[in-house]
Image (cartoon, coloured by chain):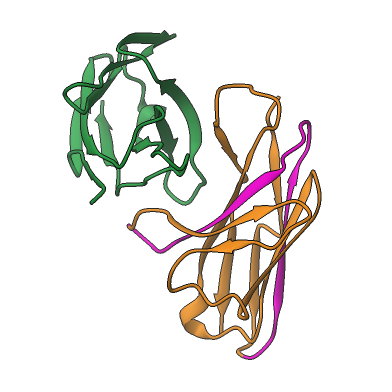
Chain colours: A green, B orange
Amino acid sequence: GQNIDQPTEMTATEGAIVQINCTYQTSGFNGLFWYQQHAGEAPTFLSYNVLDGLEEKGRFSSFLSRSKGYIYLLLKELQMKDSASYLCAPLDSNYQLIWGAGTKLIIKP
Amino acid sequence: GAVVSQHPSWVICKSGTSVKIECRSLDFQATTMFWYRQFPKQSLMLMATSNEGSKATYEQGVEKDKFLINHASLTLSTLTVTSAHPEDSSFYICSARADVELVTDTQYFGPGTRLTVL
């Protein structure tokens, strides 16, 4: 079966760094997306990894290990506006996105 | 770039009526669009994949006669919820996949439509 495992909720402090881990099991793999979703809003695209290693984009970076079925999203210099759910979504062999429930990140002052 | 709009943003209707939601890719062509539904504090649930010029592909358990999808052009897909009932109240979100790669197979989401059926 297809499965995504990421923490339900995390809390971090403004200005700090937080790492959100995600493990996945899919039938085939064609890359993995991270999306950010604020409460009551639609998801917005953050990053895409298809090869092993690190992808950096400003304050956000993501690291993929395909052999381990593992990816993390690292958020630096946290801001209050980063409070949101972060969705780890792999693309399976049919190029279909597999959605989990996401990790709700709470930023405290 | 990669902007997707949805209309309306929210709608309240009476039970038994039909509601049409539009999804437009504003600055790119999208042969493929997707329709999702999300209940509070739950993950996105794919309802159907909409392909321009052909019939939509519905996920298991989604009634195609109740959720009518039309993808008449490369920039517009519509979802019609027919004979809506209170249990259809949800957040409906569309996404579009750019024909020309912006990032491979990335789906860009519209802002969503909040439907409340009384």
* Residue B10 is covered by the magenta coloring: no
Which residue ends up furthest to the bottom in the rendered image?
A: B16
State the count of labels: 0
Q: Residue placed at 55% from the left, 25% from the top?
A: B104
Report the side of B94 relative to A103 (left or right): right
Report the side of A47 relative to A13 (left or right): right
Q: Which of the 4 quarters of the picture holds residue A63? A: top left
Q: Residue placed at 48% from the left, 64% from the top?
A: B59
From this view, report whether residue B94 is shown above or below residue A95. Answer: below
Which residue ends up furthest to the right in the rendered image?
A: B73
Image location of residue A31, percent across then percent down: 40, 27
Q: Which of the 4 quarters of the picture holds residue B40? A: bottom left
From this view, report whether residue B91 is shown above or below residue A73. Answer: below
The part of the chain drawn in magenta is B16-41
Closest to the observer, B53 or B38 = B53
Q: Residue placed at 61% from the left, 80% from the top?
A: B66
Closest to the observer, A53 or A75 = A53
From this view, report whether residue B27 is shown above or below residue A60. Answer: below
Image location of residue A1, percent across then percent down: 23, 51
Image location of residue A109, percent across then percent down: 26, 25
From this view, report whether residue A60 is shown above or below residue A91. Answer: above
* Residue B24 is covered by the magenta coloring: yes
